[in-house]
Image (tube, helix red, strand yellow):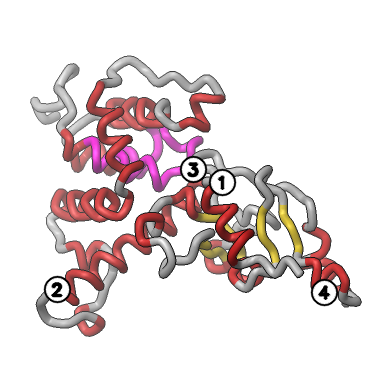
Amino acid sequence: MSTTKTKGRLWTRDELIIAMNLYCKLPFGLLHARNPDVIALAGLLDRTPGSVAMKLCNLASHDPVHQARGVSGLSGGSAMDREVWNQFESDWDSLAFESEKLLADRRGIRIEESADILEAELPRTGKERERMVKQRVNQSFFRSAVLAAYEGRCCLTGIAMPELLIASHVVPWAVNEAARVNPRNGLCLNAFHDRAFDRGLITLSDDLTVQVSPRLLRAKADEISQHWLLRYNREPIRLPHRYRPELEFVRWHRENCFQAA
């Protein structure tokens, strides 16, 4: 065993940013030392799985959702944990990309390879290439973070097939640059309800229950529409285990996208 895996070795900022990356991508119930993803990250950081799992739990203790549940973290928490948490919260776009870049560097691969971006899809050099790479990397991060928050299930139907799930933006990507990568601007929806949400046929109330457009409620509903849309009116969504939708974003969607008439 490496001699660096000693108890008490302080975590660096880069290590914490990489750990936060994994925290965002794992369902809460998998933040333990037996998880293969935790074991793999421990190897990259030259730490024990137990040390990584403890750090993930300490990061979880800063989440308001878990604070409300009484999650207080384990011994070994630090002021830098809080600092890194706040950095993500204030600038998801930059920190998500930085965390992916640091992770790729630890793996000894280029960020394009880490994100499965084909060279043929990118300009050879320049600012446009950098912009496209960052966008693709952050889109992948956002999807992973949103699906993990909802434990890989549609928040309306409970569908758990990844091929059918979309990390839906509450405020669209093109509208709010600062919220593009923020998982609190995301919902895990199946492809059908993602389309309905995007077109304003459904939205959310402040208490995170579904509102179906009055236009649909007034229309004569066929059996399919009844089953896939109208039945969810006033039903609560399945709440995520972290990163609940921000009310500011929910209200924006209701006021700007919802077909209320």
Work out whether 203 lies above or below 27. Answer: below
Q: CA distance from mark 4 to mark 3?
A: 32 Å
The residue sitting at the top extreme is: 75
Q: Is residue 244 magenta?
A: no
Report the magenta stretch's main SS.
Answer: helix
167 and 42: which one is in front? 167
In the image, what residue type sits under mark 4?
A: Ile
Q: Secondary structure at mark 1?
A: helix
Residue name at image x 65 percent, y 58 percent: 159
Q: Which picture quadrant has residue 52?
A: top left
In the image, what residue type sits under mark 3?
A: Tyr
Q: Label 1, on which residue?
A: 247
In the image, what residue type sits under mark 2?
A: Lys
Foreground disc of the pair 1, 3:
1
Q: Label 3, on which residue?
A: 243
Q: CA distance from mark 1 to mark 3?
A: 12 Å
Direction from residue 117 to residue 23 in the image, left or right = right
Residue 61 spot, x, y in % from top left: 42, 26
